Image (spheres, helix red, strand yellow):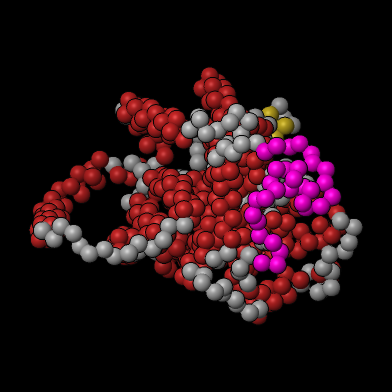
Amino acid sequence: MEWLSNMLGPDAARGVGQFVGINIAFVVTLMIVAYTVLAERRILGFIQGRLGPNRVGPGGMLQPFADLLKFIFKEEIVPDKATRFVYFLAPIIAITAALMSIIVYPFGPDVNIPFIGTVRLVVTQFDVALLYVLAVTSVGVYGIALAGWSSNNKYSLMGALRSSAQLISYELSLGLGIVGVVMLSGSLDLYQITEQQGGYWFGFIPKWNIFPQFIGFVVYLISAIAETNRVPFDLPEAETELVAGFHTEYSALKFALFFMAEYVNMFTVSVLATTLFLGGWNGPGVGTFPLLGVVYFLLKVFFFLFLYIWLRGTLPRFRFDQLMNFGWKFLLPLALVNVVVTAAVVFYTM
Amino acid sequence: MTTLLFIVLAALAVGSAVSLVVQRNPLYCAISLIFVFMSLAGLYLTLAAPFIAAIQIIVYAGAIMVLVVFVIMLLNVEEEERKPLRLRALVPLAIVGAGLLFAEAAFILYWVNESGADRARSVGAADTGLTKTIGAGLFTTYLLPFEITSLLILMAIVGAMTLARRASAIRPTDLVVPGSSVLARQTLTPEPDSDATPVYSRTTDEAEHALGLAGVPHRREED
């Protein structure tokens, strides 16, 4: 970075670095998303005793690209009497809100890259990174709500209404589940939260937040699965009742954008769970080989993505009143109790 | 760079605000309002107040406006029609008021600007927008207003619950689920329990007799 900042000045050099970082993060995220879709289809196939897509490329490895090409060349169908402007706006909002959060993921410690110098493996680090992620992902609900409204279709509208109700309800528990971690680490910066989870208790238990904050972890994970509209909380797109929910009327690339947004959101949830509760890139040997941190980080993230797929292959869907009762009468009080207890412990010990 | 960002965001905010007033479809108004909030959040960011920006999006764009959009979609509000202007006498008054507002803004920009900006800089604007500073301020200097506000919100919640309860309409066996008024609407209008006595019959006429509906005119298939 030295020569770059000598040539352009420090501000422009930082700008160039962030631009490159954003592009790398964007491409890597989309590749992970593409292969999550493939992994989901193969693993679901395995769970259900069939093969799944294995024809395109070795072991089906090129299937995501074939799918993408198909989406691009499909015909765009806009329903009659759809509100056209909003109909086009909705998928854009969904994918933008999902992708905006990738710039704050801390996916590794400081590493020494030859010819470039020391690089911190996070695109940008700022004071309120966690709140930023919550904020931009909470905007994603407009993508769903507006898609359902503008399609001029009863199923879409019902799906969108269910989705909005579900997202509003579970966002509370999601936020309260995280509060415990924030109180323990005293920071909203994801990079600092990760750094504080390095080291060991008694020499062998890693200092991950999942141990002191197990209830917060469970609350976070359940509400995050509900936030991403995945099984067993996939009522907004319940096939048996609503055809496909809010995206019933969407075809071709617009449908692909919703699909991608859903998987990027899953990725975000997995990254947040890893960073907040499982110590991010921390693990044995990271101090000597910093690049090992990236491997640990990705392994933990892939574990959560696998959990999503596993749940989808295993669990049936909730009923709507069960969903609401569970969210408001069980998860929210549990999260509140966890916040109070954590606050008391933090106050009296630190 | 900051000036450029300010111009873009300010133009977006003012443009969305105008569109919010001018649009006739309520949902478009709501979307414009969301854009106003977003560009305001961007302005806060350029003012080095990331916490306020994040809270602005989470609270206003992420929570309040979702409820507004939700209600608009639920009620299926139609486009409003342009009505002929009433109270024509107010038009010159409005023009005078707008002129005064612009004069005020110009006055502030040209004569007050310099000293005010200097004062803001001397206070130490670098860390005023950070989470720690705001938290410390809220829980020490401004603790009383903060607590009073939270009490006010609690009262509003209790009031809303009381108004929405409608104790007479809901039977003790009913299940009212928050956030799903669509599904709970049937349970809100009480209807007499129907007679569940089983009736044995072979033909439609027999069934009508048993149910006491014989002689009631009803539509036949061939009509």
Question: Does residue A213 appear anywhere in the picture?
Answer: no
Bounds of the magenta segment: B194-223
Q: Quadrant of residue B80?
A: bottom left
Q: Nearer the viewer, residue A247 or A336?
A: A247
Label tally: 0
Identified at 55% across, 40% down, the residue is B189
Q: Is residue B152 left or right of residue A74?
A: left
Q: Is residue B145 visible?
A: yes
The one of B19 and A299 positioned closer to us in this rendering: B19
Q: Which residue is more in the foreground, B121 or A269?
A: A269
In magenta segment, residue A343: no
Residue at x 53% of width, y 57% of height: A145
Query: Does residue B118 lie above or below B93 as drawn?
Result: above
Q: Locate residue A319, reporting x and y percent.
A: 69, 44
Q: Majority secondary structure of the magenta segment?
A: loop
Q: Is residue A17 left or right of residue A317?
A: left
**Residue at 41% across, 61% down:** B78
- Is B197 covered by the magenta stretch? yes
Q: Residue furthest front?
A: B215
Where residue A184 appears, x then y in whole percent?
56, 31
- For the point 46% across and 48% down, the residue is B67
Report x, y in % for residue B65: 43, 50
The furthest residue to the right? A49
